[in-house]
Amino acid sequence: MGQIFNLRRIFNPPPALAPVVFSPVTIKVPMAPPGLFITFEGMDGSGKTTQMHRLAARLRALGRTVLETAEPGGTPIGTKIRRILLDAANQELSPTTEVLLYFASRSQNVDEWIASALNRGEIVLADRFTDSSLVYQGCGRNLGVDTILELERIACRGLKPRLTLLVDIDAETSLARARARNLAQPHCETRMDDQSLEFHRKVYEAYHALAAREPGRVKLVDGRADVDAIERQVWSIVAAYV
């Protein structure tokens, strides 16, 4: 005997459930902090750190409150991480460990110093930020851009510089300057300087690709000029932001 279907149930389904009413939900969208975040990027030996200090002095002379920081480093915890990352004795440091340590230092910098200074309306100048990880670890170490952006999402939570000054010198000049500096003032923080010329060329190319992709934020500064001329270039760009 065949299966008997309940036609009443098929053609007369039960009454529809009462409509669901959703209560209004307020979504908090992060607002840009009132301060100004400017980063300096470039190859080692480009002179970016000197230019950051000069810009800070100029801004303070104009009455602005300025926080200077660096990566890796900045905070006391970041400085301890820096010693691990840059110590020439740590050549066995893997690319994955390297990038995680850089972002650990960066996250501490954001949480302890940068975010609070920006919220107070100050100008923050940083010697390197996530762009360095994009070019050195993402491209130089072949970890990929997506990996860096995912780590940035976790560590920086949307914080990006409004302006990035890329002090531009080629890989050969970078290595020559960095190694001359290391000979003149011997220290142990040379692990990245000890990388191959091929590695540094990849970093240089990645910096230029970044500048081409984000011309509104990343501004090229000719690092081959003398120190005073570079300072004038920097100020000609920054003046419009302050």
Image: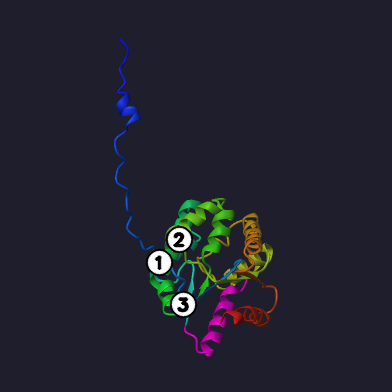
Residue range highlighted in magenta: 46-65
Q: Name which quarter of the figure residue 44 lies in.
A: bottom right
Up-down: is 83 above or below 151?
A: below
The chief SS type of the magenta part is: helix
Q: Amino acid at mark 2?
A: Phe
Discs 2, 1 touching: Cβ within 8 Å: no
Q: Earlier in the sequence, mark 2 or mark 3?
A: 3
Which residue is labeled 3 in the image? Answer: 34
Residue 224 seen: yes
Residue 55 relative to residue 119: left or right: right
Separation of disc 3 and disc 1 at Cα? 20 Å
Q: Amino acid at mark 1?
A: Gln
> Closer to the camera, 183 or 218?
218
Q: Check disc 1 and report its element: helix, strand or loop.
A: helix
Tell me the crowding category of disc 2: few under 14, some 14 to 19, or many 20 or more residues within 10 angstroms, Cα based. Answer: many
Q: Check disc 2 and report its element: helix, strand or loop.
A: helix
Tell me the crowding category of disc 3: few under 14, some 14 to 19, or many 20 or more residues within 10 angstroms, Cα based. Answer: few
Discs 3, 1 touching: Cβ within 8 Å: no
Q: Residue 96: x and y, percent?
A: 48, 51
Q: Check disc 3 and report its element: helix, strand or loop.
A: loop
Image label count = 3
Which residue is labeled 1 in the image? Answer: 108
The reply to whether the magenta stretch includes residue 120 is: no
Residue 84 relative to residue 238: left or right: left
Q: Amino acid at mark 3?
A: Pro
Which residue is labeled 2 in the image? Answer: 103
For the N terminus, give its image quadrant.
Answer: top left
Separation of disc 2 and disc 1 at Cα? 8 Å
